[in-house]
Amino acid sequence: MTASLKSHSVGSSLVLTISNPEHRNALGPELYAAGVEALSVAEGNPDVRSIVITGEGSHFCAGGNLQRLLANRQKPPQVQAESIEGLHNWIETIRACPKPVIAAVEGSCAGAGFSLALACDFVVAAANAVFVMAYSNVGLSPDGGATWSLVRALPRATALQLLMGGERITPERLQQLGVINTVCGNGEALDQALTLAERLNARAPNALASIKDLVNDAASVSLHTQLAAERDHFVRNLHHANAGEGIAAFMEKRPASYR
């Protein structure tokens, strides 16, 4: 069965489901292109307020397909380089998407699957989820932005322990370290992720887009540059219709209705 990326809507949330259950939802080039396209369409659709990424069945994503990687060893290096570029395009599209992207994780979350979850803005994981940077276990180094994400989320020694040691880490420990947001009961990750999405969907989309943009840039710019960016976003959002609605709703003690 060919891997695919399924999609359906739940209210104002778009759910993207990695579908390759025979291989624990292992990733491949066909999924990368579909992921970029789905997020690009969602970005331009005002009816979509958030995106949830999950896996079909009892696993999120086991990372790369080792049989495909083994076959690629017999091909020119450019073949694998182009495949990784496809994955990286998807990762960058998730990071750049102005709408919240939430990973709903059950079961295996390994290798590039772990990288994919880390690229999302929020991670909701079932208690039985297994997170592992499995690259070094098979003589490989990371991709999908794993090193970028973990070094920004964890102390260097902890990041190296996960990346070099290839050790499994529980969702509870990742939550303690501040890497994931929520740990829930087995089989509840998607429902909990959609509950989170619903809360976010009720907020002003332009304000959330500004917050994501500011957070994405904060670690790589000076305080002076960040302050200027905060000023510009604030002024732009103040003059957006949603600020008028939000302030009025707060003063009138009623729920706001943003568009």
Image (cartoon, rainbow, N blue to C red):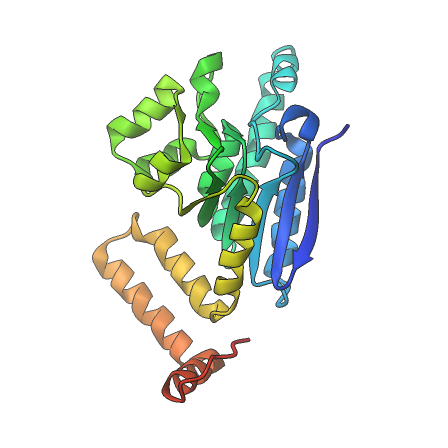
Q: Quadrant of residue 9?
A: bottom right
For the C terminus, the quadrant is bottom right
Residue 148, image x and y in percent? Answer: 38, 36
Q: Position of residue 215 (x, y in %)?
A: 35, 55
Residue at the left extreme, as displayed = 223
Q: Quadrant of the N terminus?
A: top right
The answer to whether 244 appears left or right of 161 in the picture is right
Left or right of 42? Residue 108 is left
Q: Count every numbered label the image shows and give the total.
A: 0
For residue 212, what is the image quadrant?
bottom left
Residue at left offset 51%, top offset 41%: 91
Left or right: 228 with respect to 192? left
Residue 206 sits above or below residue 29 on the image:
below
Residue 229 percent location from the top left of the image: 32, 64
**Residue 203 in sight from this viewpoint:** yes
Give percent across and percent down for residue 33. Answer: 66, 40
- Farthest top residue? 74
Can residue 144 be seen from the camera position used here? no
Residue sitting at x 56%, y 29% = 84
**Farthest front residue?**
185
